[in-house]
Image (spheres, grey):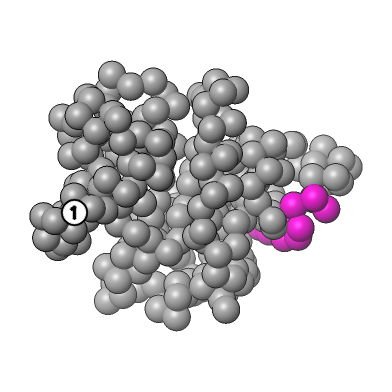
Amino acid sequence: MNIIELKALCFSYPSGQQVLNNINLSLNKNEKIGLIGANGAGKSTLLQSLMGIHRASSGTITINNLLLNTKNLKNIRKIMGFVFQDTNAQLFCPTVFEDVAFGPKNLGYNESEVNDLTKKALETVNMASFAQHTPHHLSIGQKRRVSIATVLSMNPEILLLDEPSSNLDPKSARELIKLLQKMEKTLIIATHNLELVKQVCEKTILLHQGQIKLFDNTKTILNNEKLLLEVGL
C-alpha cells in the first residue's frame, strides 16, 4: 500500500535556483528508507517539501491518499512527524515532559491522554527518568532522543528524520540505530551516516543534484563503490 507518492515534483527558491527536479517516488507503509546524497543534493528540501514547509513549484505530493495542499495540510501533519537536525528547534519548554507533551496538547487530547502519550513516547526512547530535567542540560544524544519523543507523542504513521546522527558520539549513534530498528513506522532518514542507513533501512534513495539517481535496495547502492564515488559519497 503506497503511503507516500510524489509525481513530477519540482522545487525552486525565489532566486530561481532549482533544488528538486522531476522527483517521482512511491513508498509503502512501514518501509524504512534511507535518503543519501552529497551536501546540496536536496535531501533536507525534499523532507521539508513532504511536510509542506516548502511548497512545490510543480508536481504533486500525496500522503496516505491525501493530496498535499492547504486544505489537507493539518490532517497530513497529524499523519507525519518531522525531527529536525537541530534539536534546539524542537526543545524549548522548561522540562523534558512539557516538551514531549506540547504536541499532543496542541492536537486537542485531554490531560489524561496527553500524560499517557508523553510517558509512552519517553519510555520508547529510554528517557522516562529524565522527564523533569531541563532539556538544555542534557547531552547531545539525550537531546536527540527527546526530540524524537516530541514527535512520537503525536503518534504519527510516518517519521521524517533530518541527519539524526549528526554530532553524536559512537555510543549515542549505536543507541539511535537500535531505537530506529525497533520502530514500526514508515521512516525516511536523510543522513550522511552510511552505517546507519546500512543497519536500519531496507531501501535507499540516492539524490544527486536534485534528482533521484537511484532508488534500490540499500545493500545494492552501498556496495556500488563507483557510484558512491561519482556522487561524492
Q: Is residue 94 visible?
A: yes
Question: 42 or 140: which is nearer to us?
Answer: 140
Question: 111 or 214: which is nearer to us?
Answer: 111
Relative image position of residue 171 (x, y in whole percent): 56, 23
The residue sitting at the left extreme is: 111
Question: 222 or 43: which is nearer to us?
Answer: 222
- Disc 1 residue type (three-letter): Val
Q: Residue at x 40, y 36 (%)?
A: 126
Question: Is residue 29 part of the magenta span, yes or no?
Answer: no
Quadrant of the image containing the C terminus = top right
- Callout 1: helix, strand or loop? helix
Q: Is residue 11 visible?
A: no
Q: Residue at x 55, y 69 (%)?
A: 29
Count of marks placed on residues: 1
Q: Residue at x 59, y 71 (%)?
A: 28
Question: In the image, 224: left or right of 164?
Answer: right
Quadrant of the image containing the N terminus = bottom right
Question: In the image, 97: left or right of 27?
Answer: left
Relative image position of residue 56 (x, y in whole percent): 45, 65
Dot 1 corresponds to which residue?
Answer: 114
Above or below, comparing residue 85 to residue 161 in the picture: above
Above or below, comparing residue 60 to residue 95 in the picture: below
Overall secondary structure of the magenta section: strand
Question: Is residue 212 part of the magenta span, yes or no?
Answer: yes
Magenta stretch bounds: 211-220
Relative image position of residue 181 (x, y in whole percent): 58, 47
Q: Residue at x 74, y 52 (%)?
A: 218
Density class for disc 1 (Cα within 10 Å; few <14, some 14-19, many ≥20) is many
Question: 130 or 87: which is nearer to us?
Answer: 130
Question: In the image, 105: left or right of 22?
Answer: left
